[in-house]
Amino acid sequence: GAVVSQHPSWVICKSGTSVKIECRSLDFQATTMFWYRQFPKQSLMLMATSNEGSKATYEQGVEKDKFLINHASLTLSTLTVTSAHPEDSSFYICSAGGAGPAANEKLFFGSGTQLSVL
Amino acid sequence: TQLLEQSPQFLSIQEGENLTVYCNSSSVFSSLQWYRQEPGEGPVLLVTVVTGGEVKKLKRLTFQFGDARKDSSLHITAAQPGDTGLYLCAGAGGTSYGKLTFGQGTILTVHP
């Protein structure tokens, strides 16, 4: 089946630094990618929808200047947490889908990135 | 805002018992997906149900999509410790066009 690779799996950084997380679709072209945030023992919270070649669409309450999303190619989307603070510590997960209105109906998830900000 | 109510939130049972997890909404979904997630990993798709009234079986797991495509259930027969994990339902389509709506999740613990 399709594989989505997310890197790094975990990262520890100092407060005030920026962290970049990569999400790659390995064997298919993903025109749409989604970024989620998940707190322990809770469900996934959609942060933004990343569309190849255009600006990401952010969910209400998500700071676009804080969480920069770039989807420059059909196989790579990146999420950069800028000036990270301890409250940004969380598990971040990406998913990738195909094209069109049903893009989210067959999604493949990355393995997630555990971010810890000291 | 489209909501998908998942219950129960926590479930702790003994090996061999049966259980059912429910997802309910007032919105109609074009499809509904069930995922299982283990700590530190991404969700893994178990099944997608598309047709109202559809029933799908995956070994000891039975998934059902409501006739009106507003609700779904996951039934596990003779649960095993390996079934332990976070189960998530997610609806596609409906009023939140182009997005998946996730339920709150059910943390299942099966004790040996």
Image (cartoon, rainbow, N blue to C red):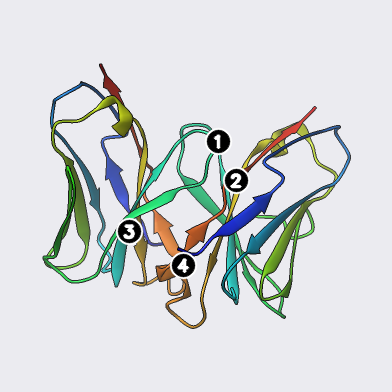
Identity of the amino acid at label 1?
Gly
Of badges 3 and 4, nearer the viewer stands 3
- Locate residue A81 relative to residue B13 in the image: left or right: right
Identity of the amino acid at label 3?
Gln
Q: Position of residue B30 (x, y in %)?
A: 29, 72
Identity of the amino acid at label 4?
Lys
Q: CA distance from mark 1 to mark 4?
A: 23 Å
Q: Are marks 3 and 2 on the same chain?
A: no
Which residue carries the number 1 mark? Answer: B40
Is residue A61 visible in the rendered structure shown here? no
Mark 4 touches mark 2? (CB < 8 Å):
no
Q: CA distance from mark 1 to mark 2?
A: 7 Å
Instruction: Label 3, secondary structure: give it.
Output: strand
Mark 3 touches mark 2? (CB < 8 Å):
no
Q: Position of residue A38 (x, y in %)?
A: 55, 42
- Nearer-N-terminus badge (3/4): 3
Image disc number at residue A112: 2
Classify residue B86 by image quadrant: top left
Residue visible at 40% across and 69% down in the picture: A105
Classify residue A94 by image quadrant: bottom right
- Is residue A60 depicted above or below A116 in this figure? below
Disc 1 chain ID: B
Mark 1 touches mark 2? (CB < 8 Å):
yes
Q: Label 4: few (<14), some or many (≥20) within 10 Å?
A: many
Q: Position of residue A100 (x, y in %)?
A: 49, 83
Disc 4 chain ID: B
Q: CA distance from mark 3 to mark 2?
A: 19 Å
Q: Position of residue B98 (x, y in %)?
A: 46, 73
